[in-house]
Image (cartoon, helix red, strand yellow):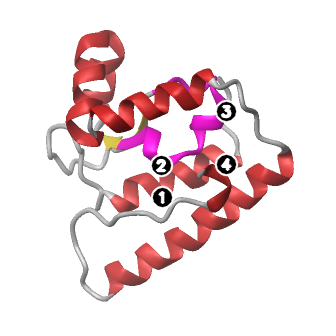
Amino acid sequence: MKRDKYDKTISELIVASADYTCEICGIRDGTHQCMHDISRTYVITRYDSRNLICGCAACHFATMKDPYLHAESFKKIKGVEENQLNIERARSGDRLKPFEKDEIRAHWQSELKRINKLRLEGVSGKIELEIPAILL
């Protein structure tokens, strides 16, 4: 599936909010990627931080090859309840209109600026994100 400008923005945000640390194994090796709990084919959860974690390339590859490891990793990090909500959101069949995707991207860009500012001030570790109203 082709990545777009929305994917690029949310990926940068997820990795930055995790302080460039794999949320599965804890490594900081520079190979970090944005990992989706529910497949990117479901647009309603594709750009939603509640469906995403930061993972190193090795953990991303391992969880793609092992559905049980994938599910357990996300449940451990996000919690069982959040996992269920992601599934429900995906199954809803809701779609995003182009202007809604633009609104979400603008929100994530402002969150990325906030995180970068906090990092410059010396804040380290995971920084929680504010969910755009359109996704609530």
Name which of mark 1 and mark 3 comes first in the sequence. 1
Amino acid type at image mark 4: Tyr
Quarter of the picture containing the N terminus is: top right
Return the residue at label 4: 6
Gap between marks 3 and 4, in whole Å? 11 Å
Separation of disc 3 and disc 2 at Cα?
Answer: 12 Å
Local secondary structure at mark 2: helix
Residue 45 in magenta stretch: yes
Residue type of the residue flagged with mark 1: Leu
Disc on res. 13 = 1
Mark toward the start of the polypeptide (2 vs 4): 4
Residue highlighted by disc 2: 49
Tell which circle, 4 or 1, labels the residue nearer the N-terminal end. Answer: 4
Contact between labelled residues 3 and 1, with CB atoms less than 8 Å apart: no
Residue at the image position 48 percent from the left and 25 percent from the top: 87
Front one among 71 and 29: 71
State left or right for residue 69 relative to residue 45. left
Task: Give, as a single range, the part of the protein colored magenta.
Answer: 38-53
Query: Magenta stretch containing residue 36, yes or no?
Result: no
Within 10 Å of the Cα at label 2, are there few (<14), some (14-19), or many (20+) other Cα atoms?
Answer: many
Instruction: Give the number of the mark in front: 3 or 4.
Output: 3
- Dot in front, 1 or 2: 2
| Drawn side of residue 20 relative to residue 131, left or right | left
For image coordinates 60% across by 21% down, the residue present is 91
Sequence-earlier tag: 3 or 2: 3
Observer-side mark, 1 or 3, equals: 3
